[in-house]
Image (cartoon, rainbow, N blue to C red):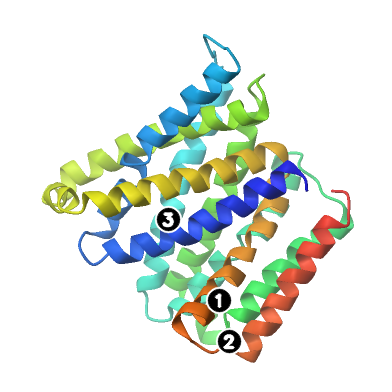
Amino acid sequence: MELWIGFTLVAVVMQSVRTAGQKQIAGSISIQATTLVRFLFGLPFAVAYFLFLKSTYQLEVIDPDWAFFRSASLAAVSQIFATVFLVKALMVKNFAVGTALAKTEAILTAIIGAWFFSATLSFVAYLAVAVGVLGVLVASNWKITLRDLVDNKSIKYGIGAGLGFALASLWIRDASLGLELSRLLSAATVLVYMVALQTVICLLWIAIKEKHQFRLIAQNILPAVFIGFTSVAGSVGWFTAMSLQNAAIVKTLGQTEFVLTLLITYLYFGERITGREYAGMALVAASVLLLLTTSV
């Protein structure tokens, strides 16, 4: 098994676990505070991982250039905006349209990557990306009507989320490849910088807008630490995989997360899997098989 596949699967598992943790704490603190928790309590783990790799490779100084800071900063801000758009998509009346459009992240990554980042794929790889996105949309029971098309809020938030996550993925890879380091260490460098910047941004927001949330966060330290750890563990997987492989390919394989979520729902909560969900899982499985049997 190629290394990027292993890191992607680790990211998928950790992201699923983190999401469960965030749902548990969401009733106690605000959405913005939950976002802060992800970065603030994840930062120590990100720093520890970075220092461990830096020591392992016996490097005393890492000297990123301005292009690194540009790409990594843009990725950090894009990721925050994408998260905000996704949350807003969940809050509008016909949220299904917005959340479904957000799941087009993989295909947007492929298109934007080819146009602006010189990250082209083979025909079969593009087909795999499209099939994977289709599988997620089918399983989501997504239906769009003419009325949905004119619902600017839902469409705006959904596409905004997908676009934000796509751009973040591409800029993460761009920043990592710009460092003349091993892929593991370059990914860790991007991670620790981004999490630090995102922590500062979210801290400032909470300090200005929601000061009372600091007390609520302090009352939920253990869940916060759990979310921070699983968030960074997932990011290590994503960032490293995207340093090793085209971001669109990584995101397509990452769509197996929804399959894992469905299986957990069935095995632990006894909820029935519908015919559409089975069809969606089959399409995602087909996209993964296409990815693993073709050269990108």
Asked if 54 appears above or below 86 in the picture, the reply is above
Of mark 2 and mark 1, the one earlier in the sequence is: 1
Q: Give x and y (percent) for residue 114.
A: 76, 46
Mark 2–mark 1 Cα distance, whole angstroms, equals: 7 Å
Relative side of 94 to 53, left or right: left
| Secondary element type, mark 2 | loop
**What residue is pinned by disc 3?**
83
Relative side of 49 to 246, left or right: left
Q: Amino acid at mark 1?
A: Leu
Relative side of 16 to 245, left or right: left
Q: Amino acid at mark 2?
A: Ile
193 or 159, nearer to the observer: 193
Asked if 71 appears above or below 153 in the picture, the reply is above
Q: Give x and y (percent) for residue 7.
A: 63, 46
| Secondary element type, mark 3 | helix
Mark 3–mark 2 Cα distance, whole angstroms, equals: 28 Å
Foreground mark, 1 or 3, reads 1
Residue farthest toward the front in the current orientation of the protein: 268
Q: Give x and y (percent) for residue 281.
A: 68, 76
Q: Amino acid at mark 3?
A: Thr
217 or 153, nearer to the observer: 217
Relative side of 40 to 145, left or right: left
**What residue is pinned by disc 1?**
262
Q: Give x and y (percent) for residue 108.
A: 65, 57
**What residue is pinned by disc 2?**
273
